[in-house]
Amino acid sequence: MSGKTVLIVDENQATRAYLANILRERLFDILEAGSGKEALISAWRDQPDLILFDPNFSDLSELEFIHKLRQNARTEKTPLIAFASDPSPARREACLNAGANEYIVKASGAILRLNQALERIFGGEAPAGESPQGGSSRGKGLLFTFLSAKGGTGTSSLCANIAMTIQEQHPEARVVVVDLVLPIGSIAQIVGYEGEQNIVAVANLSARELSGDYLIKNLPQPELWKFHLLAGSYDPHQAGNLRVERIGPIVDILRASFDFVILDLGRSLSRISLPLIQQADLIPLIVATDLSTVRLTKTVWEYLSEQGIDAPNVYGILNRAVGLEGLTKAEAEQIIGFPIKTTLPYMGSNFTLANNLNQPIITKYPKDTAAIVFKTTAEEMVKLARQLRARAGLN
Ligand SMILES: Nc1ncnc2c1ncn2[C@@H]1O[C@H](COP(=O)(O)OP(=O)(O)OP(=O)(O)O)[C@@H](O)[C@H]1O
Ligand SMILES: [Mg+2]
């Protein structure tokens, strides 16, 4: 379990030292805090992999402490173990309800229970970042490559919304979205991220700096969207400086440290995108309902097929992005030659409004048919990708 950091929070210095010794033997890196407020600062700044705390602070209530951690994107998923002197069931229940993962009473057998809890939380998981070539024992994350034959079909909007829905349905999983549309990405705009961290910056990191741990800690997790984002280039000038040869290794590192790696490739079929499509577990292909896009999609599909892509890996999504008119699903399938798995209804100006407000559809319009389609589609995509992976493993 080396490479993971535990923040130990206890007002008693001797208890901290005692726990630190035990955890260091298990090869954890240790941070310490002697008060609730100090612990919050360290939790948000250092982003430890686990927080072990005595829920008895003189400067904060334990519920306030847990709520604050859970409400902040940087610590909303950090495992929290309460290590408490108070054996009362009410205290225990309150902590667990507030979002603590475990409540262990400081009594005989406590260290055994702590070890069991660590096993449950980190069990069998290789430390992220130690295997930049992707050979980690946590297995390779599932790779989804969103693609379309034409611009403006809703690829980026669907990519962001489906990724968010997958993250929502699998809160324990790590999901990352990578915007590889050149020269200007658009996912950052959709989710409302305005920072500088993006594919060009990450591709410029040295091999030593670039690790799974680095990406987990440094990629933003936009509010409401919850997934990690590796944003695209923000202008053509910057895109010109992208070290494209680093994209393959970056995706490998992401797959070693995230459970779902979701790429927006837009309409690009190139030297860069083809090898990514070839290793994808699932290729969501977004189709619009106008005849010219459907015909172009057929051309793209024929090309992919020549490049060794199997039809079951392609996940056709018909998106009515421009209105109700256009071809039916059956007509589109007939022309393209592969099944369309799901159809997203036309949402009028609501989709653009949600995008402009940086809100996911399932949050903004939870009752809309589109929200239901996003949920069933996300579920089905994950299930299908896992089946395809299992089948590929048998060959
Ligand atoms: N089902 C839908 N109903 C209504 N509007 C939609 C729907 N899907 C997408 N849109 C709108 O279509 C526009 C284009 O979407 P988006 O930018 O996601 O497409 P894209 O294929 O990624 O385009 P680009 O080629 O620019 O990358 C957006 O304004 C979005 O709000
Ligand atoms: Mg796009």
Image (tube, rainbow, N blue to C red):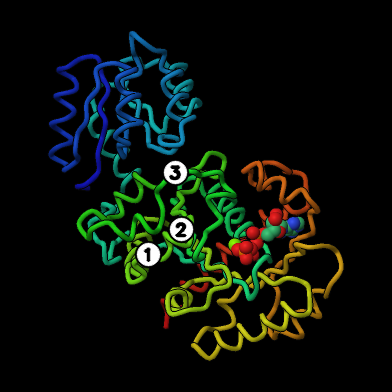
Disc 2 and disc 1 in contact, CB within 8 angstroms: yes
Is 247 or 252 nearer to us in this picture? 247
Few, some or many C-alpha atoms within 10 Å of disc 2 (few <14, some 14-19, many ≥20)? Answer: many
Task: Please name the residue that numbered disc 2 is placed on.
Answer: 233
Residue at image coords 57%, 68%: 266
Circle 1: residue type: Leu
Residue found at the very far top of the displayed protein? 58
- State left or right for residue 17 relative to residue 112: left
Residue at disc 1, secondary structure:
loop
Label located before the other in sequence (1 or 3): 3
Q: Which mark identifies residue 195?
A: 3
The amino acid on which the numbered mark 3 sits, given as a three-letter code, is Gly
Q: Which residue is tagged 1?
A: 242
Measure how far apart labels 1 and 3 are at the Cα level.
17 Å
- Number of the label disc, if any, that sits on residue 162: none
> Taking 246 as reference, is 47 above or below it?
above
Q: Earlier in the sequence, mark 2 or mark 1?
A: 2
Residue at 37% across, 27% down: 103
